[in-house]
Amino acid sequence: MDFDLTREQDMIRREVRKFAESEITPVALELDATETFSPALTRKMGEIGLFGMFVPEAYDGQGLDYISYIIGVEEIARVDGSQAATIAAGNSLGIGPLYYFGTEEQKRRYLPPLCRGEALWGFGLTEPTAGSDAGGSKTTAVRDGEDWVLNGSKIFITNAACEMSLGVTVQAITGTREGGRPEYTCFLVEHGTRGFKAQPMHGKMMWRASNTAELYFDEVRVPGKNILGKRGDGFHQMLQTLDGGRLSIGAMGLGGAQGAYEMALKYARQRQQFGQAISKFQAVAFKLADCAMELECARNVLYKACWLKDRSRPFAKEAAMAKLYCSELMGRVANHAVQIHGGYGLMKDYHVERFYRDQKLLDIGEGTSEIQRLVISRYIGC
């Protein structure tokens, strides 16, 4: 067993960390406070190769392994959840379905600008009445000659309603299978298509500098060539996309936990009470020791899941475990970090307050913690 990263993976960690600390940290508080998505910062992340990391160079991707991509997300999340969300959703949910299931024509059309970080693509699965129950979608697509006409809505869709948004992958009901179950098909819908409206969502508790959208489809007509893959493959495509996406959510949890831990450790060493640094008090030292131990465990379970994916081995169970453990770990670490900061941890001038808020979506997005436990329980035979 070899636990060492490759030279290239080590370099990616160093370079992305340097970028995150110099370009993102100085503006993170302001972007969060004003709920501002930054196209300029997103393009900079594209310029250093954070989009299309696992996509071949033929489509302007980086041609790297999945662990390298996860390290990139992890290092951005170490300083800011909003920018990490843009990267994670841009790759796993935006680029991923196009790369894994798209036709060659679709790949050539959409992947290059997405992989260069010049544009973003959304992943239209969640609906007002269909969250954990992904099979509860009500958006429909009806065939009309060579075209399909979409009607319905989606909600909580990342990267789908900003000036960089190029389009969205939409799951819709296209018929009924044997036994009465709905047939789901995914469609590619570009911005500017008549009847398609994308509206930014504001007032979020977390990821306030990422772009989140509500999508509306009112008699939206798209050509048959805009079907992603084959008719009827939509539900399978979405589930497979979520398996890979859970690894990026795990990376956000791991990176966010690492950042909160480092802030708590630094503060504990500097803060003086009763004549000594509070890190010397056992109550604080044990909290930090637990954080350090769990970070080591989380990194191992996440990287193993990525290692399995890179080798084309089954990884869905491990992805669910990594997503569940890393996301909940950030909650524990961020809670300890705020407690160690005391009253200062409650103030928006301190980054740790933002980390505490940003964590919560990790328990919910791309399959709630309850759904992850359901997935794992089925794999172990319950």
Image (tube, grey):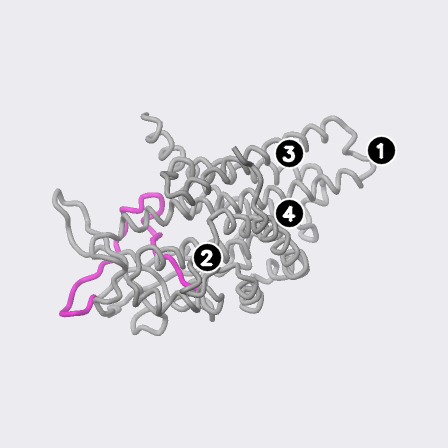
Amino acid at the residue labelled 4:
Glu
Which residue was labeled with disc 1? 276
Q: Tell me the residue at 30%/60% (across/down).
A: 102
Residue 54 is marked as none
Where does label 4 land, which residue?
353
Q: Residue furthest right?
A: 275
Q: Earlier in the sequence, mark 3 or mark 4?
A: 3
Any mark on residue 63, and which?
2
Tell which tag, 1 or 4, sits nearer the viewer: 1
Structural distance between the alpha carbons of marks 2 and 1: 50 Å
Q: Which residues are magenta?
A: 120-148
Q: Earlier in the sequence, mark 3 or mark 1?
A: 1
Q: Which residue is mark 3?
A: 292
Question: Is 51 drawn above or below residue 318 in the view shown?
Answer: below
Task: Say which of 296 and 68 sits in front.
Answer: 68
Callout 3: few (<14), some (14-19), or many (20+) C-alpha neighbours within 10 Å? some
Q: Looking at the image, is mark 2 or mark 1 earlier in the sequence?
A: 2
Q: CA distance from mark 1 to mark 4?
A: 25 Å
Image coordinates of residue 100 in percent, x first then y, are: 34, 55
Q: Secondary structure at mark 4?
A: helix
3 and 4 marks in contact (CB < 8 Å):
no
Q: Is residue 136 magenta?
A: yes
Q: Earlier in the sequence, mark 4 or mark 2?
A: 2
Measured Cα–Cα span from mark 3 to mark 1: 22 Å
Which image quarter: residue 370?
Answer: top left
Let me know if residue 81 is in the magenta part. Answer: no
Viewer-nearest of labels 3 and 1? 3
In the displayed structure image, the side of residue 324 where residue 128 appears, left or right: left
Q: Position of residue 303 (x, y in %)?
A: 50, 40
For residue 11, above or below residue 263? below
